[in-house]
Image (cartoon, rainbow, N blue to C red):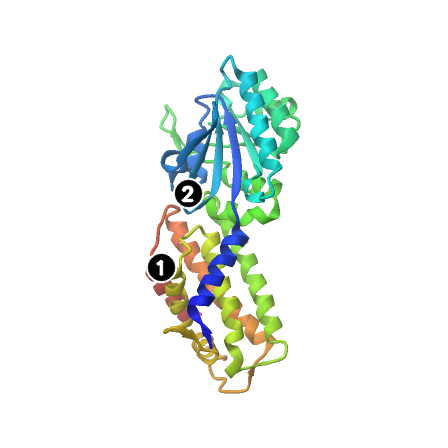
């Protein structure tokens, strides 16, 4: 028998470590819509509710407990001291890039330029030149309404940008009553993912709320890894009495999916989810109980009375559990990207989902 508390603690620690933390620098002139963009892309109205800490005279660090991202919001492009601002910012980026902890590096930068202005200022070109030397840079054309070739102009003037994306962070009603919906936010998340280290993609998935497909994609990778581990565990068939070897794999998978969807990852939350998903109570995890309770939700598997868990069966059980959990969370966040579901609510939905399979 393995103590459930220990399994939960280990799973939380592993999921938190593997998710890590991402830092994105967002620069642009006043009024360009940076705060609106931050709030549209990231969880919990980060620009409004996050804690801001000055790191230079014109740059503040925005973060919030439970959201694995720090935003570096850089202002002062219009100021007479712009060169000093640029120099201070470059020093911050260099210092962080030299830090041994990769969670402190600045992993990407967004340079925001308002489409209505129809021009790229010299200060923006200078900032582009500096940033591109140190971090992957994406040019973000904000408040997009009508391109008229402006994106190509930005590409020409900011050639070191990894890409240029037009976004509209909030819907707008035009004078004729026509509604312009949001646009470009999903693409911005995808493009950012392409330029950051692979190890920071789970943090990006957990921090953002604009691209549910991206979060699901990261969660599917966790399930695939767990399925491979479960198959390896069952390569020399696991007797039911020893099936507790699957417990750390499946609990770790649930913790990883929970983490990548940006939900609270506490012992209480994980315990509730595990109990709902696998039907195990008490202070210990007993291998046979795990298997019987999982198998009863899968037609054809629940009739197995003895023998062993094969690699294929161990993998199938793990995939079924993981994909059911992803489907439940995807349904919740598709209905409301700002949802804060309780563990008990998720658990009830998960039990229902597994009964349907």
Local secondary structure at mark 2: helix
194 left or right of 280?
A: right
Local secondary structure at mark 1: helix
- Residue placed most toward the observer, 172 or 29: 29
Kindly identify the residue that appears in the image at 41 percent across and 55 percent down. 331
Q: Give above or below for 262 relative to 99.
A: below
Mark sitting on residue 343 = 1
Q: Horizontal and vertical percent for residue 219?
A: 52, 56
- Residue placed most toward the observer, 36 or 17: 17
Kindly identify the residue that appears in the image at 58 percent across and 44 percent down. 101
187 left or right of 292?
A: right
Kindly identify the residue that appears in the image at 55 percent across and 26 percent down. 89
Q: Horizontal and vertical percent for residue 27?
A: 51, 27
Residue furthest to the top in view is 80
Residue assigned mark 2: 43
Tell me the quarter of the image containing the C terminus. bottom left
Callout 2–callout 1 Cβ contact below 8 Å: no
Q: Give above or below for 215 relative to 280.
A: above
């Amino acid at each position: 028998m393995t103590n459930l508390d220990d399994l939960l603690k280990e799973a939380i620690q592993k999921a938190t470590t593997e998710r890590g933390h991402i830092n994105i620098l967002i620069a642009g002139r006043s009024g360009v819509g940076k705060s609106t963009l931050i709030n549209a892309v990231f969880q919990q109205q980060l620009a409004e509710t996050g804690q801001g800490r000055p790191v230079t005279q014109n740059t503040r660090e925005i973060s919030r407990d439970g959201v694995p991202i720090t935003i570096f919001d850089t202002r002062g492009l219009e100021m007479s001291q712009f060169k000093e601002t640029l120099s201070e910012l470059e020093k911050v980026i260099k210092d962080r890039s030299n830090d041994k902890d990769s969670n402190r590096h600045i992993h990407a930068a967004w340079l925001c330029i308002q489409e209505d202005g129809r021009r790229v200022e010299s200060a923006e070109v200078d900032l582009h030149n500096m940033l591109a030397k140190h971090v992957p840079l994406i040019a973000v054309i904000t408040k997009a309404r009508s391109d008229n070739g402006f994106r190509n102009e930005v590409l020409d003037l900011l050639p070191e940008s990894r890409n240029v994306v037009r976004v509209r962070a909030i819907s707008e009603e035009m004078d004729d009553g026509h509604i312009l919906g949001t646009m470009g936010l999903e693409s911005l998340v995808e493009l950012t993912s392409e330029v950051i280290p692979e190890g920071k993609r789970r943090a990006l998935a957990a921090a953002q709320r604009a691209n549910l497909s991206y979060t699901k994609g990261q969660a599917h990778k966790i399930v695939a890894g767990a399925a491979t581990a479960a198959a390896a565990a069952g390569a020399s068939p696991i007797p039911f009495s020893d099936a507790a070897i699957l417990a750390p794999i499946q609990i770790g998978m649930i913790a990883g999916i929970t983490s990548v969807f940006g939900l609270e990852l506490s012992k209480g939350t994980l315990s509730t989810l595990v109990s709902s998903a696998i039907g195990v109570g008490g202070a210990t995890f007993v291998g046979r109980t795990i298997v019987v309770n999982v198998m009863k939700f899968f037609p054809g598997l629940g009739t197995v009375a003895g023998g062993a868990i094969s690699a294929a069966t161990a993998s199938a059980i793990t995939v079924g559990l993981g994909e059911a959990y992803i489907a439940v969370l995807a349904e919740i966040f598709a209905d409301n990207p700002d949802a804060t579901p309780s563990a008990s609510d998720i658990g009830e939905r998960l039990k229902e989902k597994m009964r349907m399979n």
